[in-house]
Amino acid sequence: MSEWFRRTIVESGRLPLFCFFAGVIGGFVFIRVSVRMIRAQVKWWPGNVTPGGGLHIHHVVFGVIFMLLSGVSSFVVPDELVVWRSILAGLFGVGSALVLDEFALILHLEDVYWSEKGRTSIDAVFVALAVTGLLVLGVRPVGVEDFLLAGTPDGLPSYSLAAVAAAASLSLAAITLLKGKIWTGLLGLFIPVLLFVGAIRLARPHSPWARWRYTKDTPRAAAKLARSTWREVQLRRPVIKSKIWLQELVAGHHDAPPQG
């Protein structure tokens, strides 16, 4: 394991990225343990930060501060000081976790942490971990590697090919996301076959693509909407229930009254 870590992470220059990844995991685990302890009204655990006057400082505020401090500091630290850059990357990861854990609050501009809408924050953290994990393992979005390597005038054709590949991937990803397939669209940037599958398959019934294409007054559109709705109910809902079970196992039960 140590040999794999040295060869795959350290020697490849991905140690700061790995520390960022670890920081996101550590920050998310800590804050979720903390909020669940607070929600359960555990007396010996420090409660919410309330300086007075009814003000409740959400942990997204601390996340923004951590990200600013580590982000600005990373511009000052020389590139050759890998250890310090890795420490700052880890701190940036912790701050990112605190911000993403309240992504739903930022999105809706209201405290929806323990509501149904609050599950959006868990999705945001899972997506961040999945994408960062792929980057840590050396997986790159389609076309990016060729674009980075084509750094000379002789590499102009490589630039063009990389640009075409990237544009095609982004176009397919956009179609997939518009069809309501978030995970498929994001992971497809690294695994191209997912983009082809996501782009040609039916859209989810409540997605923008379905509203634009499946609500037309034509038999073909009506048939597609009926098939899409059947798939959502019969195939996707069991998967969603499993995802919600995993989310609540990790992050706590949403829409449940506080315990204690």
Image (cartoon, rainbow, N blue to C red):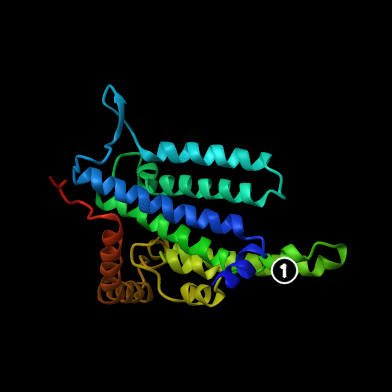
Q: Quadrant of residue 179?
A: bottom left
Residue 241 appears in the figure: yes
Q: Residue at x 26, y 37 (%)?
A: 47
Q: Position of residue 58 (x, y in %)?
A: 35, 37
Q: Quadrant of residue 59?
A: top left
Q: Is residue 187 above or below residue 26?
A: below
Give the camera-side residue of 61 and 2: 2
Q: Amino acid at mark 1?
A: Asp
In which quadrant is the N terminus drawn?
bottom right
Q: Residue at x 56, y 67 (%)?
A: 189
In this rendering, would 231 be left or right of 94? left
Q: Is residue 167 above or below residue 71?
A: below
Q: Position of residue 31 (x, y in %)?
A: 35, 47
Farthest residue toward the front?
Answer: 2
Q: Which residue is mark 1?
A: 146
Farthest residue toward the left?
Answer: 260
The number of discs equals 1
Q: Residue at x 36, y 56 (%)?
A: 122
**Label 1 element class:** helix
Q: Position of residue 63 (x, y in %)?
A: 45, 41
In which quadrant is the C terminus drawn?
top left
Residue 141 appears in the figure: no
Q: Position of residue 27 (x, y in %)?
A: 42, 50
In this rendering, would 15 be left or right of 42? right
Q: Is residue 108 above or below residue 210?
A: above
Instruction: Give neighbour class at mark 1: few <14, some 14-19, many 20+ (Cα, 10 Å).
Output: some
Give the camera-side residue of 44 and 105: 44
Farthest residue toward the top?
Answer: 53
